[in-house]
Amino acid sequence: MTAAELDVSMEDKMLTSKVKVALKVDDATSPYVEGVKVGSRNRIVHLSGKVPSQEVKKQFSRVVRSVAEVAGVRNNLEVG
């Protein structure tokens, strides 16, 4: 475990779990969730990985923002 991982708060861990669940139950994002890394720090959710289209990338952001505790989204998903 890295120092950065140790520094993640319990709230951020819980938020990451909530976001992952929301992404798994959304019809547009669920097929791609396994290829996307989700993390959070200070209530900002970070997404990385690859998705097939710009619309799917946008949907990931919409779903993340729908989770009440999320303060912001850093969507670094690549389209391709």
Image: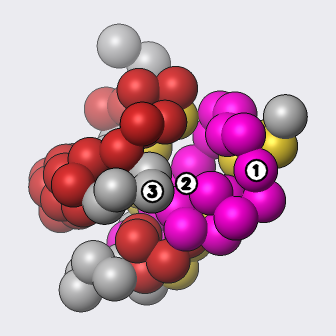
Residue 50 visible in the picture: yes
Q: CA distance from mark 3 to mark 2?
A: 19 Å
Is 33 contained in the magenta span? no
Residue drawn at x 31%, y 60% as measured from the top left: 26
Q: Residues within 10 Å of mark 2 (few under 14, many from 20)?
A: some
| Quadrant in the picture for the N terminus | top left
Reading the image, the residue beneath label 1 is 53
- Circle 3 or circle 2, nearest the eye: 3
User: Of residues 26 and 13, which is closer to you in this image?
Assistant: 26
Reading the image, the residue beneath label 2 is 46
The magenta span reads 43-60
Q: CA distance from mark 1 to mark 3?
A: 11 Å
Residue drawn at x 31%, y 32% as measured from the top left: 6
Tag 3: residue type?
Ala
Tag 2: residue type?
His
Expressed as whole percent of the image width and height from the top left, the position of residue 75 reads: 67, 60
